[in-house]
């Protein structure tokens, strides 16, 4: 981690994306993007591998295709249904590009009620990344967004390939709806609240053959995470 008042990095990108909905639950995205990055001397001194050959500049074209099947009852907190996600990216389309790698990423979620109060969900996810030289700026694997083993939220595990599985069992303890009469718009007077105690167990593995010798100790080993939680929805 680095904290500084100086300008450390500049990023520019331009993107065109086409979206097509081929059915009620089916979505396809095609995007092409140009990216140009610059890091300043502080970054280059601390991490010579941030860009390839310690270059302050990095620019490349990227082509991506994405498919999503989403048949869940409520996207932000689903209790039943499933979601399938797959994405392919090619970074570096031309010889002049400073990057040459491709990524295949996929994820699957399955949510199932076990009774009127008991719910379960299971998720699988992973990525394959092949490269002709991988800079640190494009090494992010587990620990970003929801791609993590719960219990390791404070860590990042960089690398090329990774896979993970997550399972959760939760119980609907409270499910109430309150009407707040002092709100003038009737569309906003209804305030629902649900509380779900839960237990979970996750497993994940990140493979790294570039950065594992340099401050990436959680790569190339199985990571387990279990715990309990309380969701307020």
Image (cartoon, rainbow, N blue to C red):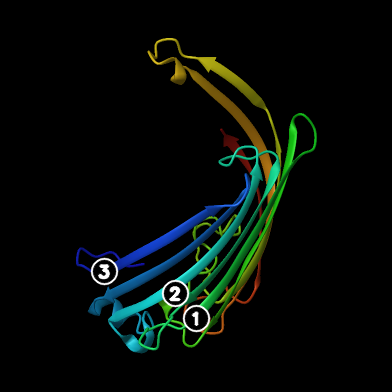
Q: Is residue 18 left or right of residue 149?
A: left
Q: Nearer the viewer, mark 1 or mark 3?
A: 1
Residue 39 location, quadrant: bottom left
Residue 217 seen in this snapshot: no
Work out which residue is located at the far top of the displayed protein and give it.
181
Which is nearer the N-term, disc 3 or disc 2? Answer: 3
Q: Residues within 10 Å of mark 2 (few under 14, many from 20)?
A: some
Which is nearer the N-term, disc 1 or disc 3? Answer: 3
Q: Residue at x 52, y 57 (%)?
A: 153
Of residue 166 and residue 109, the one placed in the foreground of this image is: 109
Identify the mark at residue 171; answer none if there is no mark.
none
Of residue 65 and residue 100, the one placed in the foreground of this image is: 65
Identify the mark at residue 138; answer none if there is no mark.
2
In contact (CB < 8 Å): disc 1 and disc 2? yes
| Image position, residue 81 (x, y; %) | 70, 43
Work out which residue is located at the far right of the displayed protein and give it.
115
| Image position, residue 91 (x, y; %) | 45, 77
Count of residue discs: 3
Q: Which residue is mark 3?
A: 10
Quarter of the image with the C terminus is: top right
Of residue 102 and residue 5, the one placed in the foreground of this image is: 102
Q: Residue at x 66, y 44 (%)?
A: 71
Q: Which residue is mark 1?
A: 101
- Distance, label 1 to label 3, CA atoms, is 22 Å
């Amino acid at each position: 981690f680095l904290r500084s008042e100086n300008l450390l990095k500049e990023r520019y990108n331009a993107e065109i994306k086409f979206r097509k909905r081929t059915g009620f639950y089916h979505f396809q995205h095609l995007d092409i993007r140009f990216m140009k990055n610059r890091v300043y001397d502080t970054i280059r001194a601390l991490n010579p591998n941030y860009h390839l050959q310690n270059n302050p500049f990095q620019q490349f074209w990227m082509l991506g295709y994405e498919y999503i099947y989403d048949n869940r009852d409520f996207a932000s907190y689903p209790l039943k249904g499933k979601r399938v996600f797959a994405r392919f990216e090619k970074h570096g389309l031309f010889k002049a590009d400073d990057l040459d790698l491709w990524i295949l990423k996929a994820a699957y979620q399955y949510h199932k009620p076990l009774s009127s109060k008991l719910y379960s969900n299971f998720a699988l996810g992973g990525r394959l990344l092949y490269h002709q030289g991988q800079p640190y700026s494009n090494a992010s694997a587990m620990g970003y967004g929801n791609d993590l083993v719960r219990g390791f939220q404070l860590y990042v595990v960089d690398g090329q390939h990774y896979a993970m599985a997550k399972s959760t069992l939760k119980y609907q303890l409270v499910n109430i709806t309150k009407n707040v009469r002092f709100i003038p718009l009737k569309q906003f007077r209804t305030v629902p609240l649900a509380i779900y105690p839960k237990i979970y167990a996750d497993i994940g593995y990140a493979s790294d053959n570039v950065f594992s010798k340099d401050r990436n100790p959680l790569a190339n080993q199985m990571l387990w995470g279990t715990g309990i939680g309380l969701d307020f929805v």
